[in-house]
Image (cartoon, rainbow, N blue to C red):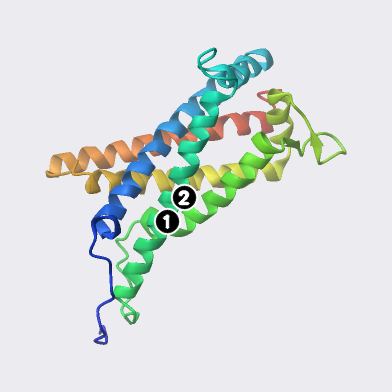
Amino acid sequence: MATSTVSKPPRTRTGKAGSTVFLKVLMAVTGFIFVLFVIAHMYGNLYKLFAGHLAFNEYSEHLRTIGEPMLPRHGFLTIMEIILGVSVVLHAYSAAALWKRAKAARPQRYVMRKSIAQSISSRWMRWGGLFLLLFVIWHLLQFTIVKFNVGSGGNTAAITHDPYELVVHSFNVWWVTLIYVLAMIALGMHLRHGIWSASQTLGFTPTPRARVIANGVAIVVALIVAVGFVIPPLAIAFGGIK
């Protein structure tokens, strides 16, 4: 039997910028930016790593020269990094604010257990998002900011400026591959639930048929991205890419 207590409703902002609807839309839009980025990033890694050392390094260099001469070297990437960085902050802020409001609206936990019908991806959305944030920081440090090569023989902190060698050496280390695979599982779950929620927030599911389509798209995109990201490190770990 469920028990509850009567408490004062939480104080919330009434302005548009502080409304729950605004925060949900903000999460949906920033999430959509992430989806476009991870699809492009996944495709580039998957296609060019299997194309070989030279092809992958040429691809890596090309990313730094997009827009030249109208933009300076690394100009396009800098713009994208700013957009993605701002999106991360806004996405995390919206998620934290919505979670805080939901918790404040029900300060006393019910004795009755939550419905077992609640999806795993929904249940783990918050902690999966935190894990992904920590992974992104690690990923940027390893492959972009510091470029430390954990698989370079006995020197586990060597620095390399060869993108292909950095990737291949890194995924020859079992625990790096394991972290990456777990992160991609978390990403797939996050994308599945996030795309479905965003489609509802943005009004793309007004009918039962539209909801079925949105759910199918969420599942397909999540699987494609997660599997596409996991294939290269596993291929490296098992000797398919050297």
Total number of numbered discs in the rendering: 2
Residue 231: numbered disc: none
Q: Which residue lies at the image location 46% right of the left edge and 50% below the top edge?
A: 89
Of residues 159 and 84, the one nearer the viewer is 84
The answer to whether residue 167 is seen in the rendering is yes
Q: Is residue 190 shown left or right of residue 208?
A: right
Element at badge 1? helix
- The reply to whether the C-beta atoms of the residues labelled 2 and 1 are less than 8 Å apart is yes
Q: Is residue 13 shown left or right of residue 158?
A: left
Provide residue 147's location: percent of width, then percent of height: 72, 35
Provide residue 119's location: percent of width, then percent of height: 34, 56
Element at badge 2? helix
Q: Residue furthest left?
A: 207
In the rendered view of the protein, which quadrant contains the C terminus? top right
Query: Which amino acid does the dot numbered 1 rest on?
Result: Tyr
Provide residue 60's location: percent of width, then percent of height: 61, 21
Of residues 4 and 103, the one nearer the viewer is 103
The answer to whether residue 120 is seen in the rendering is no
Position above or below: 226 against 48: below
Q: Which residue lies at the image location 68% right of the left edge and 33% below the top edge?
A: 237
Q: Which residue lies at the image location 55% right of the left edge and 46% below the top edge?
A: 183
Provide residue 181's location: percent of width, then percent of height: 57, 42
Residue with the mark numbered 1: 93
Query: Which amino acid does the dot numbered 2 rest on?
Result: Val
Q: Could you say which quadrant of the image residue 213 lies in?
A: top left
Q: Label 2 crowding class (10 Å Cα cut-off): few <14, some 14-19, many 20+?
A: few
In the rendered view of the protein, which quadrant contains the N terminus? bottom left
Residue with the mark numbered 2: 89
Q: Which residue lies at the image location 58% right of the left edge and 51% below the top edge?
A: 134
Q: Label 1 crowding class (10 Å Cα cut-off): few <14, some 14-19, many 20+?
A: some
